[in-house]
Image (tube, grey):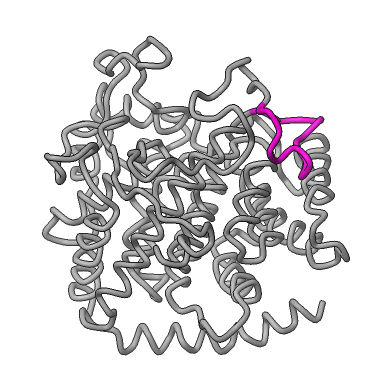
Amino acid sequence: MQHIQGALALCVLLLTGLATAQASETSLGIERADYARKLHGFWLGQSIANWTGLITEMDRVETPFYRDEDWGRVDQPNIWGAFVNHSSRIDFYLPELDRVWGSDDDTDIEYMYWQLTEASDTPVLTPVQIRQGWLKHIYSNEEAPISATEFRRENYLWVSNERAFYLMRDKGLLPPATSDPLNNPDFAMIDAQLTTESFGLMAPGRPQLALNLATLPIAVTASGEAAAIARFYVVMHAAAANLNNKEDLATQLLVIAALAAEQLPVSGYARDMYEFVLDAYTTNPDKNDWEKTRDAIYQRYQIRGEGGYRYSRPFDAGINFAASLISLFYGEGDFRRTVQIASLAGWDSDNPAATWGGLLGFILGKDGIERTFQRRFSEAYWIHRTRKAFPDHTPDLAGEDTFSQMAQRGVDVVEKVLTTED
């Protein structure tokens, strides 16, 4: 409890800092080079965590779950009996410096939203702009290229993203109608979490502004509690810009999580999950025993259906939100430990891993991630692995973009956001 009491005391100071930032920030309120390093760290950290988490994605959605001792062991098949192609072991995926980071659904739609915002006259995207962007940059199943590894057409859309795309294409619907439960039965799935969290980075230190930017993109695929969970992640990313390097990172993450939890309905299952996992972490004398809490959420939510939650599928926003909180709290701000726990926790493991890998990558910046792994990384990014019709920013190199160029353009987007709103 002393750890949490310290966090609550610090919360007052950080919230004061957030208010001050909102009152004084202008288009020049961020230092370009520093923020570019942070955005580079976001894309790099998210890619490392995404491809690490993909190794265990859907391997374990019920007992027996993975545990710490499984790290480094041979990967097991997922619930469909398949394996990934990029690694045979459960470990960090750290490709050689000359390799290209492939896009995946944890990074590619976020990439699209940054490009749409960059090209837009105003930072708040309209329903028409969003629909046009989706139809321009996302393949249908009918036109998607044949996968070089799976030998079938693959458009890299699943559950609610897939539903929303075809509602936009075939029925001409615009968000938020694309997430209306009457139109989209997958409205409670995880999709919005992994496509909208980085709107928080467009409005550093200004959570409400970030939510204004993200509200309609969230409503492309999520309604109800799933939308509230997505807002939680947006606020976490916006508030991360105000973390104090002189204070303990684990404590500060608890602080901004408490701020983000205000987005969760008081009587809803997401708030119950947040409070349950936080209490389990706080009262656990062994902070390495994250498995105890994972096993408890499995019993409480998936088996017994408590807290107002009814488990549907392993892609649910709910069960994956609970799992992601485990890695956030028990990871205590350590990039490697957080991604390790997220990858082993179960269910749709690449998504929580990518979420916190991106957030911690932003906090650490490019240099911090390199120090964490004691090595340099490729910055080449291959968006056309999964999406289409983007400019080739690196015509003489593999891929279509680099993290450093993405970061520089990202700072331009941030300045547009802050200038427009000031």
Instruction: Please tell me whether the stretch drawn in magenta is mainly helix, strand or loop.
Output: loop
In the rendered view, does 48 fall on the left or right side of 280?
left
Q: Is residue 344 above or below residue 4?
A: above
In the rendered view, does 69 fall on the left or right side of 146?
right
Front-lying residue, 413 or 245:
245
- Please identify the quadrant where the N terminus is shown: bottom right
Image quadrant where residue 280 sits: bottom right
Please check the rendered image and state whether residue 154 is part of the magenta-colored stretch, yes or no: no
> Percent position (x, y) of residue 151?
38, 10
Identify which residue is drawn at 25% across, 36% down. Answer: 134
User: How many numbered circles are shown?
Assistant: 0
Q: Is residue 3 above or below residue 218?
A: below
In the rendered view, does 172 fall on the left or right side of 141?
left
Front-lying residue, 150 or 321:
150
User: Going by the picture, which residue comes out furthest to the right?
Assistant: 285
> Percent position (x, y) of residue 170?
26, 21
Please check the rendered image and state whether residue 67 is part of the magenta-colored stretch, yes or no: yes
Front-lying residue, 411 or 96:
96
Image quadrant where residue 184 sits: top left
The magenta segment is 59-75
> Percent position (x, y) of residue 52?
54, 41
- Please identify the quadrant where the C terminus is shown: bottom left
> Percent position (x, y) of residue 242?
45, 79
Front-lying residue, 25 or 393:
393
Identify which residue is drawn at 19% across, 76% down. Answer: 419
User: Going by the picture, which residue comes out furthest to the top?
Assistant: 151
